[in-house]
Amino acid sequence: MKGCGSQPGCTPGMVVGDTLRVVGIGCEARSIRLRGLTPGNFRPFGQVLMEPAGAGGADIETGRFWADVLPIHHDAPTAGIIRYHPRPLVIQRMERHPGSGQTFVSLSPGGALVAVAPDRDDEPDIAGLQFFLAGPGEGFRLAPGTWHASPFPLEGGTLRFLVIMKPGTIGEGTEWHRLRIPLGVEPGNSGVGTSGP
């Protein structure tokens, strides 16, 4: 990842296995290991969009094509572009979309920090909060109802995603939860003192 000076939210060099310190006002810091965006790691929250391993796909004149690498369960999905601006690594609220999954495909040259949490009594379970590193060109699908924060750009620039979802997901199809204590995220030591899966 390239350098970015003192821009808000800029954390070049963050790699899978690094420890992130999650700090809330008046709370003890917690260390969480930054995970790779792999099908096994991300399974509790959704699916990873990736080229299938091994042979297969259709031979086309200029390459190979794989169909149905990520099922979209809507009769007429909509696609849009979302742009996230650089900002400090602070989670103040999380959102979910009970009626629709959301597929994100990175259109940016930089990485993104993706924060997700399981549900507990219709609120995000912060004890189960996980962080994933999504690299340039990587994609993932959040399962319907998955609590998530807006992805954070990691190199100080804007971050753009192609988003595929059911029409009406943004707006009426969104539930928000403001955290009682905002969570600050700080890079910690590489792979030392981690907790969580």
Image: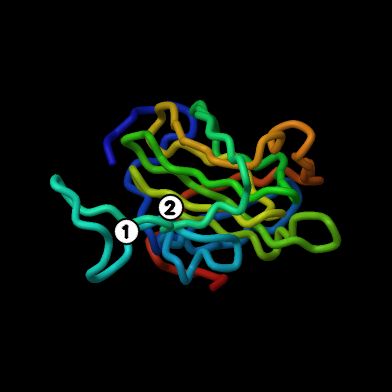
Name the N-terminal-most of marks 1 and 2.
1
Alpha-carbon span between mark 1 and mark 2: 18 Å
- Within-10-Å neighbours for mark 1: few <14, some 14–19, many 20+: few
Task: Residue lying at the far left in this picture: please name it.
Answer: 61
Q: Quadrant of residue 67?
A: bottom left
Q: What residue appears at the point 53 percent right and 34 percent down from the top-left corner?
A: 79
Q: Nearer the viewer, mark 1 or mark 2?
A: 1
Disc assigned to residue 51: 1
Q: Nearer the viewer, residue 132 or 68?
A: 68
Q: Which residue is mark 2?
A: 133
Mark 2 residue type? Leu
State the SS at label 2.
Answer: strand
Relative image position of residue 162 (x, y in whole percent): 47, 36
- Within-10-Å neighbours for mark 2: few <14, some 14–19, many 20+: many
Task: Residue lying at the far right in this picture: please name it.
Answer: 121
In which quadrant will I find the C terminus?
A: bottom right
From what the image shows, is residue 29 above or below residue 56? above
Mark 1 residue type? Glu
Relative image position of residue 185 (x, y in whole percent): 56, 47
Q: What residue appears at the point 42 percent right and 68 percent down from the top-left corner?
A: 192
- Horizontal side of 169 relative to 40 (left or right) equals right
Q: What residue appears at the point 48 percent right and 52 percent down from the top-left corner?
A: 140
Q: Are marks 1 and 2 in contact (CB under 8 Å)?
A: no
Q: Nearer the viewer, residue 8 or 165?
A: 165
Q: What residue appears at the point 83 percent right and 56 percent down from the top-left corner?
A: 122
Q: How is the image coloured?
A: rainbow
From what the image shows, is residue 18 above or below residue 165? below
Q: Nearer the viewer, residue 118 or 62?
A: 62
State the SS at label 1.
Answer: loop
